[in-house]
Image: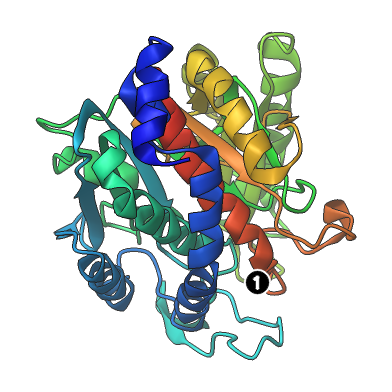
């Protein structure tokens, strides 16, 4: 049926002409056509990974591809970020789709013919670099959706901001970066999107299917460091000093009572983990100090604040009881990712059309994502896409951040469809 006839039918039915414009079938066909290019883009990104805030070649390649579509990207945002706007010809709101760009300090072991052999410097160490979390696929899928939507912009009832964000995995020590820096540098100033859509592959979702939930989807992630200061002495005469190792051991045990005994476990889950203990250099010397470093994961903002205070209080009082002191540092990471309820309901049909399966409901995940920063500014929804072949149990396959992590490339077409359907469904609903 021609576009003219569709428009006439829409007018007779009393519908906005825009609703008769871009059809689901056209989106699916366009996604299938661009799929070979999406695979090519993904393989280039996979073979050429770069660490957080160092995505210079990645950003240049993204900008080159966008210019090839006739778009005018802005570059150099938050160090290496890129944005571009697809201007729809019909009136309507601005929405955004976002992808992350950075890779991880991981030596790849997939054996793929396009496996990464890249190396870089991380925390003073020479490291391998790999897209072990799927950001290569994310970039390729957003570029695929950009191609689909840009080719249909004459019938697009609104506009689309494309966000290519660096440093999702966290900027290097002493540097700013990521979503918060993109926002601080004004990507939404004067043109705040009415909605933002994001996607992540993996997270044990069945292959090619989507999972989402309203409300808390991923945790806030905070790093803490406790330095226990004692008094050095001979290991054979502990009474002459203050043993920070014993104090540190008591602090580790004490911290576990916060999540289990001091917060309302029926309200939301929380995690306090110690990931590093460092102290002492010799078997018969009680050291001067000991460092503990760990992570706090929360979903409720008030509980997050309480746990921060409780960790410091617990460590300080345990130390004081033994005559020691502490220094406490907390580095707040991204807040909990909260999916907007109305937006989540709106995207469910788009996700089902894109995969052929109803979207799965998923439990809150204790991993973190700084996509949450966008949701603090405007309504946002984040979805998961299963990345392993359909006949594989995702719970038995290598997880995100594994040197064996991979993307089953045919499912990237589902991702392109989902981004495109979510955008068009939202714009048509306004």
Q: How many marks?
A: 1
Rendered-image quadrant of the C terminus: top left
**Percent x, y of residue 94:** 25, 31
Residue 321 appears in view: no
Q: Nearer the viewer, residue 320 or 237?
A: 320
In the image, residue 96 sits, relative to residue 378, either above or below, namely below
Judge left or right: residue 222 versus residue 166. Answer: right
Judge left or right: residue 313 versus residue 399. Answer: left
**Percent x, y of residue 153:** 27, 45
In the image, residue 47 sits, relative to residue 362, either above or below, namely below
Residue 114's image quarter?
Answer: bottom right
Its colouring scheme is rainbow
**Percent x, y of residue 366:** 65, 36
Answer few, some or many: residues within 10 Å of disc 1's Cα (few below 14, many 20 plus, some between 14 and 19): few
| Helix, strand or loop at mark 1 | loop
**Percent x, y of residue 4:** 34, 35
Q: Residue at x 57, y 35 (%)?
A: 296
Judge left or right: residue 185 versus residue 23. Answer: left
Q: Residue at x 51, y 24 (%)?
A: 338
Q: Nearer the viewer, residue 409 or 9?
A: 9
Residue 354's image quarter?
Answer: top right
Q: Nearer the viewer, residue 398 or 219?
A: 398
In the image, residue 109 sits, relative to residue 306, either above or below, namely below
**Disc 1 designates what residue?**
282
Q: Residue at x 50, y 28 (%)?
A: 336
Q: Residue at x 40, y 62 (%)?
A: 101
Q: Nearer the viewer, residue 62 or 154?
A: 154
């Amino acid at each position: 049926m021609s576009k003219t006839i569709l428009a006439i039918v829409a007018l007779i039915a009393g519908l906005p002409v825009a609703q008769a414009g871009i059809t689901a079938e056209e989106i699916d066909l366009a996604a299938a056509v661009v799929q070979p290019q999406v695979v090519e883009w993904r393989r280039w990104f996979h073979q050429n990974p770069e660490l957080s805030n160092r995505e210079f070649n990645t950003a240049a390649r993204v900008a080159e591809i966008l210019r090839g579509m006739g778009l005018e990207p802005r570059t150099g945002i938050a160090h290496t970020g890129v944005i571009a706007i697809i201007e729809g010809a019909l009136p309507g709101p601005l929405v955004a789709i976002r992808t992350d760009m950075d890779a991880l300090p991981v030596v790849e072991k997939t054996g793929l013919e396009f496996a990464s052999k890249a190396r870089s410097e991380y925390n003073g160490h020479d490291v391998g670099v790999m897209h072990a979390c799927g950001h290569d696929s994310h970039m390729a899928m957003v570029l695929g959706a950009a191609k689909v939507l840009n080719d249909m912009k004459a019938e697009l009832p609104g506009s689309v901001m494309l966000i290519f964000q660096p440093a999702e995995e966290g900027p290097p020590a002493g540097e700013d970066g990521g979503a918060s820096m993109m926002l601080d540098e004004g990507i939404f100033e004067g043109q705040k999107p009415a909605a933002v859509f994001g996607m992540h592959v993996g997270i044990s979702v069945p292959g090619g299917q989507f999972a989402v939930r309203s409300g808390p989807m991923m945790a806030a992630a905070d790093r803490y460091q406790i330095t226990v200061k004692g008094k050095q002495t001979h290991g054979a005469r502990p009474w002459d000093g203050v043993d920070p190792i014993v104090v540190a051991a008591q602090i580790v045990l004490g911290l576990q009572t916060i999540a289990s005994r001091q917060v309302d476990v029926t309200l939301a889950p929380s995690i306090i983990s110690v990931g590093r203990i460092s102290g002492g250099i010799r078997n018969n010397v009680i050291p001067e100090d000991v460092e503990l470093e760990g992570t706090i994961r929360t979903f409720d903002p008030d509980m997050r604040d309480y746990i921060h205070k409780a960790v410091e209080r617990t460590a300080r009082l345990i130390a004081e009881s033994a005559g020691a002191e502490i220094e406490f540092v907390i580095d707040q990471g991204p807040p909990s990712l909260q999916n907007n309820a109305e937006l989540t309901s709106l995207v469910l049909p788009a996700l089902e059309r894109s995969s052929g399966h109803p979207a799965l409901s998923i439990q809150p995940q204790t991993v973190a994502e700084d996509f949450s920063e966008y949701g603090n500014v405007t309504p946002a929804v984040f979805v998961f896409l299963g990345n392993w072949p359909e006949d594989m149990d995702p719970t038995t396959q290598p997880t995100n951040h594994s040197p064996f992590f991979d993307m089953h490339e045919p499912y990237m077409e589902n991702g392109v469809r989902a981004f495109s359907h979510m955008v068009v469904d939202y714009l048509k609903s306004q």
